Image (cartoon, rainbow, N blue to C red):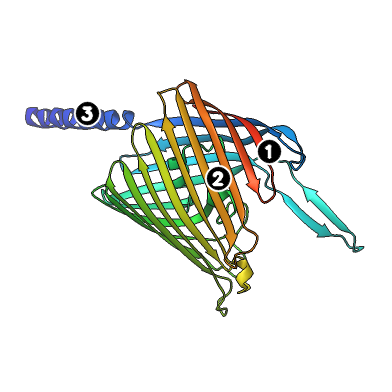
Amino acid sequence: MKNILTLLFICLTVCSAYSQKDTTKTQNLKSSVFANIYAGFYYGLNENSSPRSAFNMPTAILGYKREISEKVNAIILYDVTRTTNFGYTDSSGISGYFEGSKYTAFLKMAQIDWKIKKFLELSVGQMLNEQYLTVQDKWWDHRYVDVTFQEKFKFGMPADFGARLKYTYKDKIRFSLTAVNGEGPFKYQDADARFLFSGNIEYLPSEKIMVKLYCDHQTIKADSSSVRSAVSVFAGFRNKKVMAGAEYNLLQNVDFTDNENNDYSGISLYSGYKINWKTEVFGRFDLFSLVTGLDNVNYYIFGFQYTPAPAYNISINFRNYTPANMPQLFANFGIKF
């Protein structure tokens, strides 16, 4: 009987110690609520801007991230934009127009990440687009001023529903394969159920340099040879003082009609220089064009940024579109918390 009691005491002690260890491990898991608010004001320097001046709120984000275990985490993110905007014809044949609120909250990201191995990760849910949001947007790092080239000129959806497998090699090479619906964050999968498949590879020879290649492919129907595809090449350099980025983007057969007038291309060059930890000057040049060479659009941004407090940025910047000739002066405010 004494031996049984001794054995029982040892078992209870071991179980208690294991439980305390597991509880400590659980307590070390992190969770966080975060938000971004981007506000602005602009004034058109001629009469080509309509309206000529206005306050705006291009982005207001609210998110929550939770580590479920050492290998599993989840993130959910809501953004604000106009989600409803379409024309229609009623039963009498009269054309109408409906526009939803320009400040409607929508699900931008709802992603579960499972680190199968140290070098291999599986993600499912609604994921941000690797075409431009996961690298170029962060490298540019002035989203509160304006979005990057591909988002501005609609080269791809910001997010979509699907799955992604990512392989990492020694923190220098990241390679991922993704399958998504191809309809973006605002729609269900269409009746043809043709997925968009993409591949993305990132190479970091050092902490200061990154090279990235993204490609995707989507057919409209099973019996159709019509293919929509996108290619994006990016290279960037960054140190404590200087940021520079360059990208080339090609979008072919936008509406699946195999018409050369539906092939778009463009380049974007951007750079910034930190005068001190509070002040930065930056600039950007975008060239958007049809592959046929018609209807080119040049877009410029030049300005400076002041950081009165960590995570709070203020920018005064000048922008212009040509040949539309729309010079504008902006004041932008961005905070992350």
* First along the sequence among labels 3 and 2: 3
Relative to 333, does residue 135 appear above or below in the rendering? below
* First along the sequence among labels 1 and 2: 1
* First along the sequence among labels 1 and 3: 3
**Residue appearing at x 8%, y 27% in the figure:** 2
220 or 295, which is in the foreground? 295
Relative to 315, does residue 327 appear above or below in the rendering? below
Q: Position of residue 26 (x, y in %)?
A: 32, 32
Q: Residues within 10 Å of mark 3 (few under 14, many from 20)?
A: few
183 or 211, which is in the foreground? 211
Q: Position of residue 214 (x, y in %)?
A: 42, 58
Going by the numbered disc 3, the residue's amino acid type is: Ser
Confirm or deny contact between disc 1 and disc 2 (CB under 8 A): no
Going by the numbered disc 1, the residue's amino acid type is: Tyr
**Residue appearing at x 58%, y 74% in the figure:** 221
Q: Residues within 10 Å of mark 1 (few under 14, many from 20)?
A: some
Query: What element does badge 2 sit on?
Result: strand
Disc 2 designates what residue?
108
Mark 3, mark 2: which one is toward the viewer? 2
Q: Position of residue 193 (x, y in %)?
A: 57, 68
Disc 1 designates what residue?
103
Disc 3 designates what residue?
16
Residue 191 appears in the figure: no
Alpha-carbon span between mark 1 and mark 3: 52 Å
Quadrant in which the N terminus appears: top left
Query: What element does badge 1 sit on?
Result: loop
Going by the numbered disc 2, the residue's amino acid type is: Lys
Work out which residue is located at the far left of the displayed protein and give it. 3
Alpha-carbon span between mark 1 and mark 2: 14 Å
Q: Position of residue 69 (x, y in %)?
A: 33, 39
